[in-house]
């Protein structure tokens, strides 16, 4: 393995919700109790489905059991889909199956609270029904988008430090030169390509964004942007050279200077 010039294992802390006095808070800390409740309800539902989600049958008035090895299935009051209960005098019948809808409804309410507390759109949890689109999905994901933007600002410095450490471990001298490194993030907001381009163009036209910033907002990589700028400089030089050949130069006495090849 490559030797580590730092002499120890480098670690970078990605602090979530950093605070001035208290330690950082985990992103899922607030929803842990709600998730525990969901787990408990789901566990209860599984137990109920094991013992009561099928109609339990019974027979009344049977005085003698059949003489066969399976007669024990008629003798004891144990809930099972393959058993029949015996009781007093009367007639055959069955109990209603346990309704599991109460468990489902309770768990869905808790999941809605989890979505609200964590700023997660509810359609991320439920795939039934009509999936939101257009302005509806923008409204539904506004809280999540704001949270993601806040978290990216908090951990950008950590990622920059990771890159500096990677250069140091690799023995790359560029570590000392990348003091102004910047983490580039893609846009977390859902927008169509045309709407995004229209917004960037308007910001460029009013002077909010430079040409390079507009290209970055459109998601172009630094390498692509550098190639585009190089091509623009080359094109500008060629255009300037062409203009110099088309415009006749004037001599000191007001006469035209002959071309260089007309000696």
Image (tube, grey):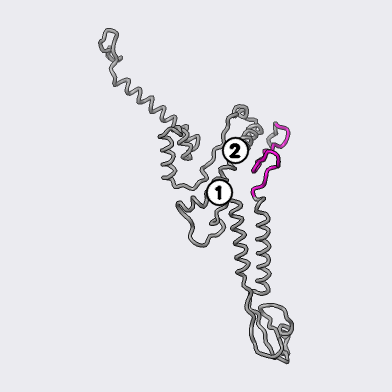
Instruction: Give the mark toward the camera: 1 or 2.
Output: 1
Quadrant location, the N terminus: top right
Horizontal and vertical percent position of residue 79: 70, 77
Name the side, left or right, on which 142 lies relative to 253.
right
- Number of residue marks: 2
Name the side, left or right, on which 61 lies relative to 199.
right
Q: State the extent of the magenta-drawn residues as a range.
A: 6-27
Instruction: Report which quarter residue 202 is drawn in.
Output: top left
Q: Which residue is mark 2?
A: 156
Q: Residue at x 43, y 45 (%)?
A: 193
* Dot 1: element: helix
Q: Which residue is mark 1?
A: 144
Q: Residue at x 67, y 40 (%)?
A: 19
- When the figure is inspected, residue 154 is found, relative to residue 250, above or below; the finding is below
Query: Residues under labels 1 and 2: Cα distance?
Result: 18 Å
Instruction: Report which quarter residue 115 is drawn in.
Output: bottom right
């Amino acid at each position: 393995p490559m030797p580590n010039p730092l002499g120890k294992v480098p670690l970078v802390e990605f602090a979530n919700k950093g605070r001035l006095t208290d330690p950082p808070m985990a992103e899922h800390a607030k929803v842990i109790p709600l998730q525990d409740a969901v787990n408990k309800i789901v566990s209860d539902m599984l137990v109920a489905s094991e013992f009561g989600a099928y109609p339990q049958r019974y027979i009344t008035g049977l005085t003698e059991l059949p003489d066969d090895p399976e007669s024990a299935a008629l003798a004891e009051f144990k809930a099972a889909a393959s058993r029949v209960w015996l009781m007093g005098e009367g007639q055959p019948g069955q109990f209603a199956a346990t309704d599991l809808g109460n468990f489902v409804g309770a768990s869905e309410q808790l999941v809605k609270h989890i979505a609200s507390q964590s700023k997660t759109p509810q359609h991320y949890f439920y795939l039934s029904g009509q999936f939101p689109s257009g302005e509806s999905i923008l409204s539904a994901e506004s809280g999540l988008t704001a949270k993601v933007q806040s978290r990216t600002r908090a951990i950008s410095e950590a990622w920059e430090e990771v890159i500096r450490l990677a250069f140091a471990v690799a023995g790359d001298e560029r570590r000392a030169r990348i003091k102004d490194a910047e983490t580039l993030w893609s846009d977390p907001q859902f927008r169509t390509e045309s709407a995004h381009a229209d917004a960037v163009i308007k910001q460029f036209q009013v002077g909010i964004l430079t040409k390079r910033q507009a290209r970055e907002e459109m998601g172009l990589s630094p390498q692509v942007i550098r190639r585009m700028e190089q091509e623009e400089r080359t094109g500008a030089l060629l255009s300037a050279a062409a203009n110099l050949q088309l415009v006749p130069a004037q001599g000191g006495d007001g006469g035209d200077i002959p071309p260089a090849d007309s000696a």
